[in-house]
Image (tube, helix red, strand yellow):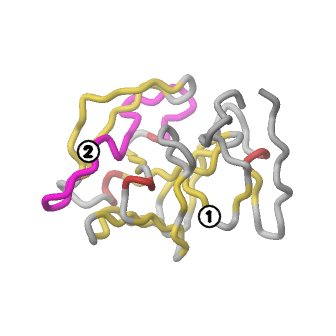
Amino acid sequence: MPRPHPIPPGPGQESVWDYPRPPRVEPTPRRLRVIFNGQVIAETVRGLRVLETSHPPVYYFPLADVQPGVLHPSPRRSFCEFKGVAQYFSVIVGERAAPDAAWQYPAPSPGYEALREHVAFYPAMMDACYVDDERATPQPGGFYGGWITRDIVGPFKGGPGSAGW
């Protein structure tokens, strides 16, 4: 399938088509928050973002900045050719659960060691995810966990017809 036409970024924006492949991990000082069942379950200014061609950033939180007791290990695993084997967690707050809504790389592949002791959340499965004070929109589709904000432009992988990008 042919590569789509990137949307030109405006002032202060990034194009996901300028992100690298293989992906890059970088620290972000932005305030990241995740809300589930009406509670802030994760908040940090010490997050990491993973940038990969055609994908909105995926934000990773230090495990120390996630509320204790909300992450419950799941048997689900997946494999990323770059980052390695991911372990999933169900997010449970009170009587509400989101199965396989978060993941980590407990033994990341070489080059991605910074992701150790960090966890990412699928924004579509949470009540809300914020970058600074902007509510992020989930990346299309159910497989990827990118967070779309007004400072990035696509088109974004994950929607119908994007599997071959």
- The answer to which of 19 and 10 lies nearer the viewer is 10
- The answer to which of 147 and 29 lies nearer the viewer is 147
Q: Which residue lies furthest to the bottom in this view?
A: 133
Type of amino acid under label 1: Thr
Q: Position of residue 117 (x, y in %)?
A: 36, 43
In which quadrant will I find the C terminus?
Answer: top right
Q: Residue at x 34, y 33 (%)?
A: 87
Q: Mark 2 points at which residue?
A: 90
The verdict on residue 95 being magenta is: yes
Disc 2 crowd rating (10 Å Cα; few below 14, some 14-19, many 20+) is: some
In which quadrant will I find the N terminus?
Answer: top right
Q: Residue at x 53, y 34 (%)?
A: 112
Discs 2, 1 touching: Cβ within 8 Å: no
Q: Which residue is drawn at 57% across and 27% down?
A: 82
Q: Quadrant of residue 17?
A: top right
158 to 76, vertically: above or below: below
Is residue 102 found left or right of 8 in the rendered image? left
The verdict on residue 163 being magenta is: no
Q: Name the residue under label 1.
A: 149
Give the label on residue 141, or none: none
Q: Position of residue 33 (x, y in %)?
A: 42, 66
Going from N to C along the chain, the mark reached first, 2 or 1, is 2
Q: Which residue lies furthest to the front in this view?
A: 160
SS label for mark 2: strand
Q: Which residue is drawn at 71% across and 40% down?
A: 53
- The answer to which of 120 and 124 lies nearer the viewer is 124
Q: Position of residue 149 (x, y in %)?
A: 62, 64
- Magenta stretch in the rendered image: 92-114
17 to 152, vertically: above or below: above
Q: Distance between the residues labelled 2 and 1?
A: 25 Å
Q: Position of residue 5 (x, y in %)?
A: 85, 44
Type of amino acid under label 2: Ser
